[in-house]
Image (cartoon, rainbow, N blue to C red):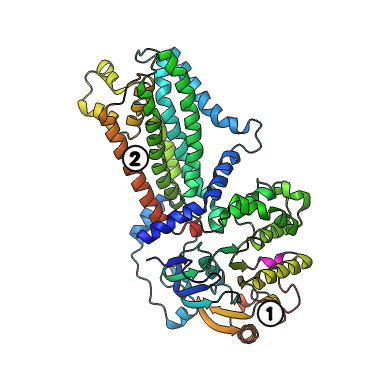
Amino acid sequence: MSGAYVQDGVAPGTVVLERATRSFRVQVDTGRTLKETLLRRGARRAPAPAPTAEALRAGAPVGDHVFALRDVDLRIEPGETVALVGRNGAGKSSTLRVLAGIIPLDTGAVRVGGSVAALLDLAAGFSRDFSGRENIVMGGALYGLSREQVDERLDRIIEFSELGEFVDLPLKAYSSGMLVRLAFAIVAFLDVDVLLIDEVLAVGDGAFQRKCEARIAEQVESGATLVLVSHDLALIERTCRRTVLLEGGRVSTDGPTDEVLSAYRHRLEDATAPVRASTAPTPTADAPGGEA
Amino acid sequence: MSATSISRWSDLRGHGFLFQQLVQRELRQKYQGSVLGLVWYLINPLLLLGSYYLLFGLLLKPVSHEAYPLFVMTAMVVWLLVAQTLPAAGESLLAQAPLLRKSRFPRELVPTAVVSVQALTFLALLAIVTVVTVPIRGTLDPALLLLPVVAALVIALVQGMALALSVLHAHFRDVLPIISAILVPWFFITPIFYEPNDLALTAPDAPGWVVAALEWGNPVAPFVEATRSILYYGAVPAWDLWLYMVVAVVVALGVGRTVFRRLERDLAVML
């Protein structure tokens, strides 16, 4: 059981999910040892109670599996700007990782046209012992660029990141703001067909954030597709025309940003689970910068 | 199936620069900030070779072979490749976990980069041993032309093992400790300080199956013997050694790739 990840099956910039399903084993400790595996094999005979329809809708675990994506169909055309919103655990980040090809599907298919770059979490892929410059080169290589293509972009990336002389120091010496700028600069100058961005924008200072938004707009104008995951509703209103609301690993609402967001705000107000509501954005988070 | 293997190849082609970066990183990361840097890659094995020379070449001399230190070194080179690569490859995927979580690229590039770096060290050592051995033993024979073939087979064997071990260790963290534990006895049963024929002299009563097991039960042994045959004896390795080596390489690569394909799926999730 394994879903397909197909590149170049569709026009550059197109993103398609077909009946995409992905679940994760509930497992607190990923550092399995041989002994645990052997022991678990014997102990795993207890039948799990059948999940209720209610629990399924809410994205509750089925047996020892939690569904991150459940039978998701989604089609994004080249040049579209799409935001994924939803409560924590709704499947937003998993969707991005599936689109980036980092997490394979259980069943269904992903089709992505052209090149993809993902800005998932900040420190990902960075080596603290290497300089900013070396990390830029490795970053480019990771996304399949050649040496010439990296060299061509190096100066622009360094300039955009505003790292100055820090670019030749190891990342150990960087502040978290510098890491954000470096991470964003690399992805923003790859000139990919599909840009996947998860949250991180909120971390930089206001000025850099505006610069990032301008750069994204530039990329979109030249035909790139943007898929953004954020809790910053104001940012979404500025950057995305279309919004997809995910609930329990399914697409709950899909449409123009203003419509979906107002529905989402209502739903947040009606939310009956106050435990999680504290981490979800509030309807008043319209101020620039929103929740960080 | 053929469609996926084609896309795999284009995947690998498109990631030449990434592979180059991974190799460079592997070369530099280990000795980052050290004064001697890359030279350590040669110093470690050379020190080992030197101490074994002292111990077994000058002090102990278990069985008499002419130019015994060379007898030992010509075999030790091969062993060093195995002993240095397997642990390094075993932890490679864990070490590069941040890269695996960041982007989609052929995962086998990671252990392969480790093997490449170790293979370069191996070739450098092999060249040193050859330069020393050939004039002293006077074995400048046509057999020497076969040395690159044996070297390539050794590297291929190690590559197969490295693929399997790297992905297995990512799933079961016991694998690396098991490798470390096995390497010590493995070293002593590998015909480095002796050759299987010596057993007829030192242990004439040893049952035939013990001798056979020492010679054929250890996948590294035939590679060691073939290298020694060319460098030390100046002789073309026997046909059964060739047959064994080719079969061992095919099996190691086949099993290594199969295991890797089956277990690589969720690397980004579990690391």
Provide the major secondary structure of the magenta segment.
Answer: helix
Magenta range: A199-204
Q: Nearer the viewer, residue A240 or B265?
A: A240
Q: Position of residue B198 (x, y in %)?
A: 29, 18
* Chain ID of residue with mark 1: A
Give the alpha-carbon distance from disc 2 to disc 1, as whole Å: 59 Å
Amino acid type, callout 2: Val
Residue topped by disc 1:
A237
Name the quarter where the C terminus of chain A is drawn: bottom right
Q: Look at 47% across and 76% down and name the residue there.
A: A72
Q: Is residue A68 magenta?
A: no
* Chain ID of residue with mark 2: B
SS under mark 2: helix
Residue B148 placement: quadrant? top left
SS under mark 1: helix
Q: Look at 45% across and 30% down and name the residue there.
A: B80
Amino acid type, callout 1: Glu
Any part of residue A15 in sight = yes
Q: Position of residue B68 (x, y in %)?
A: 40, 15
Classify A76 as above or below B144: below
Q: Which mark is residue B249?
A: 2
